[in-house]
Image (tube, rainbow, N blue to C red):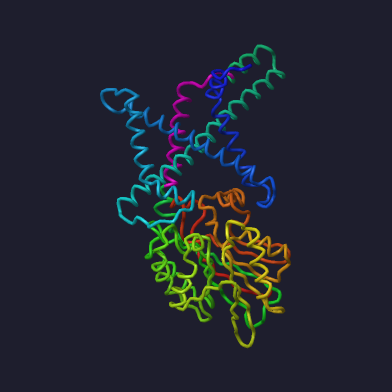
């Protein structure tokens, strides 16, 4: 029987390999995990969360250890490592405790009054920068270390191959060179490279915090609808989603997005939910910030899970109506042009307690709102509902959704779907097609959880309808 001390020693010795395997498991999960509705999903998701937690803990120990190394090296008088560890721990606990309300809201969806004081925003921003940056940098260091070991292993294999082809003496010499530990110069180079790589992770996270989260992108997308009336050829719909007004998504920023949207001269504007972050009392400010939207055929919207969970569905609908913005709640609106009609339908976010049952209930209502022979466009918040639309065979030509924020952290340029949005749905951003029906998922203009965007810029979508 293997004793606990032996297991502990082996874990400590091979922790890098263990973390690498966890990372590979996470990447595999993000790319090919089973459908959300499958019985295996919850088990796989729980394992994913455990692996993610272990990576987080490992990254914190790793970087706090590096900070202690720097302290011992640069602080005069060679302070004891134990005292440095206590100081670092207290600083860490201070930032964690100060940011805990935001962490709790993000993880447990607890709604409370927002703290807009400058020092609170700065401390929370610093915490999230460290929280995300330390993990990004840690993964980069692990990747670099893995690449270095793979290169050394390749050199060793090459040496062995040469050994089989050359005389024994030369092969032994070559094999010895390949197996020698790194020289001091090479070791110094690797250390400097590791420092540069880790700095890149923290710098990229800082970019995502200070600039990336408000670096709005206008995405132009042509939507081909075979049944589109000739009068609506070239009809342009602007979509905004996931506003999430709060300390990191201010009213001024939202009004900036409104100005950009109006400058695109859309024929119609649609909003696909989540206007508040965690503060229900911010609903009035969110509505006022969006009230400047203008389009010849009006501004329409639906509600998201933050309105539902914040219990402001009725009140924010009234506030929007007072500003001339119509929220569609299990209802439709006819968009008419030159005697032709588009049918615009909107539904609320399904309730979380019996989510799937509520999805079917709401989609039965949608069936009664569909106009046969017309192009039907559905506004909803959570894009996973699109699967049920296709499953039930509802004659919806185009569904517009949001919710995912594009994952906020995304490597879509490496592989589409390699982002945090895959934790909740395989419809993360952009256009999709299923059963002759189309879906477009907007990345939103705000953030929740960590106020950082990397590889998933905030988005204003300009959809142009076409028959061909």
Relative height, residue 59 to residue 344 (above, below): above
Residue 400, located in which quarter of the rendered image? bottom right
Q: Is residue 384 left or right of residue 311?
A: right
In-front residue for pair 44/25: 44
Name the residue rendered at 61%, 87% in the picture.
Answer: 338
Residue 394, located in which quarter of the rendered image? bottom right
Residue 213, located in which quarter of the rendered image? bottom left
Q: Is residue 313 left or right of residue 427?
A: left
Name the residue rendered at 58%, 56% in the picture.
Answer: 353
The secondary structure that most of the magenta stretch takes on is: helix
Q: State the image coordinates of residue 240 (x, y, percent, origin top left).
A: 51, 67
Q: Is residue 399 left or right of residue 182?
A: right
Image quadrant containing the N terminus: top right
In-front residue for pair 59/279: 279
Which segment did they paint magenta? Answer: 179-205
Relative height, residue 41 to residue 259 (above, below): above
Relative height, residue 303 to residue 236 (above, below): above
Name the residue rendered at 56%, 20% in the picture.
Answer: 4
Q: State the image coordinates of residue 272 (x, y, percent, origin top left).
A: 54, 66
Query: Which residue is situated farthest in the left direction here?
Result: 77
Name the residue rendered at 62%, 23% in the picture.
Answer: 156
Relative height, residue 257 to residue 40 (above, below): below
Q: State the image coordinates of residue 457 (x, y, percent, origin top left).
A: 49, 57
Query: Which residue is situated farthest in the front direction here?
Result: 353
Q: State the image coordinates of residue 298 (x, y, percent, origin top left).
A: 51, 79
Residue 203 highlighted magenta (yes or no): yes
* Total numbered badges shown on the rendered structure: 0
């Amino acid at each position: 029987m293997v004793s606990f001390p032996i297991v502990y020693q082996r874990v400590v010795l091979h922790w890098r390999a263990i973390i690498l395997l966890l990372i590979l498991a996470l990447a595999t999960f993000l790319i090919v995990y089973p459908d959300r509705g499958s019985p295996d999903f919850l088990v796989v998701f729980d394992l994913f969360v455990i692996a993610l937690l272990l990576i987080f803990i490992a990254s914190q120990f790793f970087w706090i250890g590096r900070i202690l190394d720097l302290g011992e090296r640069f602080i005069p008088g060679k302070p004891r490592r134990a005292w440095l560890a206590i100081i670092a721990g207290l600083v860490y606990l201070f930032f964690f405790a100060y940011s805990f309300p935001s962490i709790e809201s993000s993880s447990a969806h607890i709604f409370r009054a927002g703290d807009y004081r400058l020092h609170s925003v700065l401390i929370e921003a610093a915490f999230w920068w460290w929280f995300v940056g330390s993990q990004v940098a840690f993964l980069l260091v692990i990747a670099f270390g893995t690449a270095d070991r793979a290169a050394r292993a390749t050199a060793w294999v090459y040496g062995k191959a040469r050994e089989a082809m050359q005389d024994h003496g030369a092969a032994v010499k070559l094999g010895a060179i390949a197996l020698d530990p790194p020289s001091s110069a090479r070791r110094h180079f690797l250390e400097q490279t590791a420092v540069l790589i880790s700095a890149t992770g923290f710098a990229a996270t800082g970019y995502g915090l200070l600039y990336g989260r408000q670096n709005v992108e206008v995405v132009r997308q042509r939507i081909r609808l075979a049944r589109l009336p000739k009068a609506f050829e070239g009809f342009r719909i602007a979509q905004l989603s996931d506003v999430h007004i709060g300390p990191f998504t201010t009213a001024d920023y939202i009004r900036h997005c409104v100005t950009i949207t109006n400058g695109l001269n859309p024929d119609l504007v649609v909003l696909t939910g989540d206007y508040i972050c965690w503060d229900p009392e911010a609903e009035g400010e969110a509505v006022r910030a969006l009230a400047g939207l203008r389009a010849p055929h009006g501004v329409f919207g639906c509600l998201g899970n933050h309105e539902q969970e914040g219990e402001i569905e009725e009140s924010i609908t009234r506030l929007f109506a007072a500003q001339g913005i119509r929220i569609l709640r299990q209802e439709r609106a006819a968009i008419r042009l030159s005697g032709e009609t588009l049918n615009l339908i909107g539904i609320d976010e399904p309730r979380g307690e019996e989510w799937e049952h509520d999805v079917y209930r709401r989609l039965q209502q949608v069936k009664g709102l569909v106009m046969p022979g017309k192009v039907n466009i559905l506004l909803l918040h959570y894009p996973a509902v699109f699967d049920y639309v296709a499953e039930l065979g509802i004659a919806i030509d185009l569904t517009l959704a949001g919710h995912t924020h594009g994952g906020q952290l995304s490597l879509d340029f490496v592989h589409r779907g390699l982002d945090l949005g895959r934790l909740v749905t395989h419809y993360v951003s952009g256009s999709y097609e299923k059963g002759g029906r189309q879906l477009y998922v907007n990345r939103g203009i705000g953030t929740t959880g960590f106020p950082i965007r990397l590889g998933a810029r905030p988005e204003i979508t300009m959809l142009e309808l076409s028959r061909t």
